[in-house]
Image (cartoon, rainbow, N blue to C red):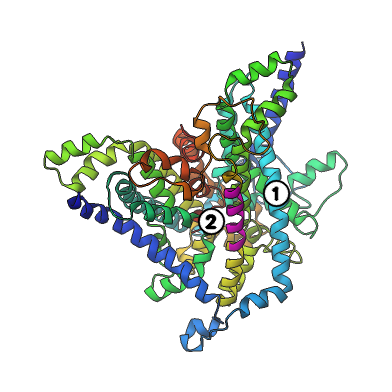
Amino acid sequence: MKRRLQAALLYGVLGSAAVVTLLPLLWMVSASFMPTGEATALPPRLLPSRLTLEHYQALFTRLSLARYAVNSALLAVGVTLVSLLLNSMAGYAFAKFRFGGRDRIFQALLAALVIPGQVAMLPLFLMLKEMGVINTYWGVIIPGMASVFGIFLMRQYAVSIPDTLLDAARIDGAGEFRIYWSLVLPACTPILVTLAIFTFMGTWNDFLWPLIVLTDDRMYTLPVALANLAGEHVQDIELMMAGAVLTVLPVVVVFVALQRYYIAGILSGSVKE
Amino acid sequence: MNRRIDPAYWFLAPALSVIVIFFFVPVAASVLLSLTDFDIYAVASRADLRFVGADNYLRLLHEPLFWVALRNTLYFVLIGGPLSVGVSLAAAVLLSAKVVRFRGVLRTIFFLPVVTTLVAVAMVFRYVYHPRFGLLNYGLSFVGIGPIDWLGDPHWAMPAIILMAVWKNFGFNMVIFIAGLQSIPERLYEAAGIDGAHSWAQFRYVTLPMLAPTFLFVAVMTMIGYFQLFAEPYVMTQGGPAHSTLSIVLLMYQEGFRWWNMGYAAAVAFVLFAIILSLTLVAMRLRRQEPLGTPLPGERPDAFRDRPSRRRQKKAAPQGERKSASDSESNDSSTVRAEALEARLPHSPLAAR
């Protein structure tokens, strides 16, 4: 009897926690489909009286949301592809080559993780301004082309590739780049997927740096555009919720589809799998 | 051997150049910048640039707004941090209970806020916190708590932001705690049960001590992340009302990129760096106190000597203890784990870049 009671209590707590966790997101979705004015009704409504897509239409027609979505997508995909290439090459080198200063360089990179990114931002902005890439895609892509974390994750994985495999390929006369491309990369697929998800989501969700570097309205990413819209359309709650839904949707879909890789990636940093 | 040097550098060069040119150089330049009076005139013409020594830092000390930002940030870190970690731990312990089914679904639900876009959910919470139309006041009205102007009242704005941060972030640490819980050997609980320990006693004397390294790690990383509070106040309150949610990074952003007082803003950034660095050093010190084989402070010394060695790898050993090049491959994975995880925290430095 006592055990039953405990179980019921446990489910009660977990269930209500799940509801509380989901509620803001569900309310966001619900309000985005409400006719204008209904989100500011008293008492507050949980569900729309009738479903309308007018706010989504307004976002795409009046507020050029498609433009921001394209910006976000291009940047997220661009940063992900370039950084995967560069990080995997460096990670492979740290894992499988011997060269002077290897460990010292690696340690210096890891030590740099202590430095908050904000410290670099002011001079980085001035630098990119000199290069003429402020307010272009490059302003976001260039600093994101490589990351210590990505190199680290790749290195940890690539270490487990057997040396004999690589040496056999060398004896067969394969060039170093060929070995990397057709042997190492395929062997690293799981960690590449993990890293790709992290990078894609990180770039998609990023706010501070795009806010700094993308100064022109046409270049905004979704989060920057949304924050900007919030200033002008503070009363149009249904509209803002529709914008929030569209911003969140892609990352939520990616996460739900690939969460196995995502969680594994988090744990590989704290617990040996 | 020598002939293998070349390809390695080819593989390294692209990534390393990016990191050196676009991170290390700016960080170094930031030191110099913080010693100049770089302002809007200097943005236009470098001729107006003057070296002012420690003036920016001295100015910080006398600037009430800086102390306000520091106080607010500490408020967020010292209340929001423990609250986040506590909720994460509670969720992890509950989810790990043996009777729980649908564990995967619940875990996904709890983790969902972590992956959502901060700016978007900040908009949603602005709505949830709306004094008249918001869900929170509506819910509270049923228990007789009268409408609170969450984001408009200087006393409530920071608690509101903390509440949202806990909602957004607890799933992340929860996943780490779950993994930590899973690595506690079952027989410890069995032994404790034989000794007559009930659930609470088991939690207190088995779970908590065994989780201590994970706990320390999670707590420090969360605090470091929380020190970088920015988007929440930017979107929800613009630092107001009455500067009650102005954070250090928001101050840096406003000074640097709104008013173009870049020298001064760089000094603000370095204060943040100094705080984070000292936190990291404290954490490393705490870890160093327990070299291989000795438990963490707070852990019971003898009872659990036979825990599996993989537990050890969770803790980052100080970098100074790294082995030489030849045998580092087998060893340094444990050395660097902790540092690496930092990069993945919701507020991580890398995410901000």
The Cα atoms of the two marked residues, 2 and 1, are separated by 24 Å
Image coordinates for residue A14, horizontal then vertical, percent: 68, 28
Between residues A240 and A110, which one lies in front from this camera angle?
A: A110
Count the numbered circles shown: 2
Residue A223's disc number = 2
Please give the name of the residue rendered at 57% of the width and 37% of the height, measured from the top-left corner: B111
Identify the amino acid type marked 1: Gly
Between residues A14 and A31, which one lies in front from this camera angle?
A: A14
- Label 1 sits on a secondary structure element that is helix
Image coordinates for residue A152, horizontal then vertical, percent: 40, 47
Q: In the image, is residue A20 above or below residue B13?
A: above
Q: Quadrant of residue B323?
A: top left
Q: Which residues are magenta?
A: B274-285
Q: In the image, is residue B60 above or below residue B287?
A: below
Question: Is residue B160 shown left or right of residue A269?
Answer: right
Question: Is residue B291 shown left or right of residue B62?
Answer: left
Identify the amino acid type marked 2: Pro
Residue that extends furthest to the bottom in the rendered view of this protein: B47
**Residue A28 seen:** no
